[in-house]
Image (cartoon, rainbow, N blue to C red):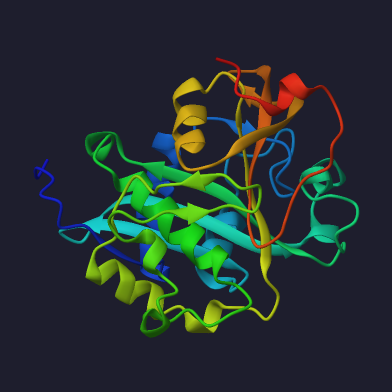
Amino acid sequence: MTPFTGLMDVRLARNDDLQAIKRLCGECFPIKYFCYPLILLGSPRYPEPWFLELVANKNYLTILATHLDIVIGMIVVEYRTLNNCKVSDRSILHHSLSTNSMVAYILSLGVTAAYRRLGVASVLLSLVLCHAHHQGRPLTRSKGSLNYLTSGSALCLSNGDVVTPKVVLSRAHMDFLDSLQDRLFLLPCRAVFLHTLSTNTAGLRFYARHGFRVHRLIPRCYLIDGKHADGYTCVLHMNGGFSQEEGDAELRTYPF
């Protein structure tokens, strides 16, 4: 394996990336998650249409990290309105906010084993958070809109928390963000959310470092080696978004 040199490129997924995406998903996500509509009991972990959707459907923003033209990481996000989320996820926004409010759902974030703990996942997540943060307004560096991802700066969240990104995006990464003007919407994105195993302590800590909080427990939503496992919904609010005040407060804090 070629040693990682920090010269990581990012780009949108293409049709000719399908096999690389399949390999990455097979390595990083050896589970079945029943909240995704195409993944049903008795079906393969990842049906073929799912992979095709990732590269062909403009509703998905599928960003790949590559090193020497080898795919080493991927993040997939879908922008949707709150009323198009599963009922169990709609409490990520307070009921006073419109059900037509836009949110971003991270379907997948994975990095191949040889390139983990090198900041690849942080770059991918930071790109998505930056893109989501700037929905509803121009994404242009000339007005300083991306400054919160530069060294020494921070992102102030709607709840008053200040999150300092754990990665400084390079000029090339910023140029990539600038190329995504056609993926911006008129509505602001109120929240970014995801699901992860309740036992995924490392993943929970990773997302906590980037400003996410556990919102609620989802019982028995994963299938691993024939056994069901619980998951968490994790959420990061932005652009005036905030969540319902419901349920056990302990489920909205990290379990460690």
Could you tell whether 101 is left or right of 74 in the image? right
Confirm whether residue 220 shows in the render.
no
- Viewer-closest of 218 and 122: 122
Residue located 28% across and 43% down the image: 119
Toward the front, the furthest residue is 160
Residue located 30% across and 47% down the image: 120
- Where does the image place residue 222, in percent across and percent down from the top left? 66, 27
Residue located 73% across and 40% down the image: 35
- Quick check: 56 above or below 236? below
Confirm whether residue 34 shows in the render.
yes
Could you tell whether 177 is left or right of 106 in the image? left
- Quick check: 70 above or below 224? below
Toward the right, the furthest residue is 95
- Where does the image place residue 64, in percent across and percent down from the top left? 37, 59
- Where does the image place residue 6, in percent across and percent down from the top left? 15, 51
Kindly indicate the quadrant of the structure image that contains residue 245. Answer: top right
Could you tell whether 246 is left or right of 127 in the image? right
- Where does the image place residue 221, in percent across and percent down from the top left? 72, 29
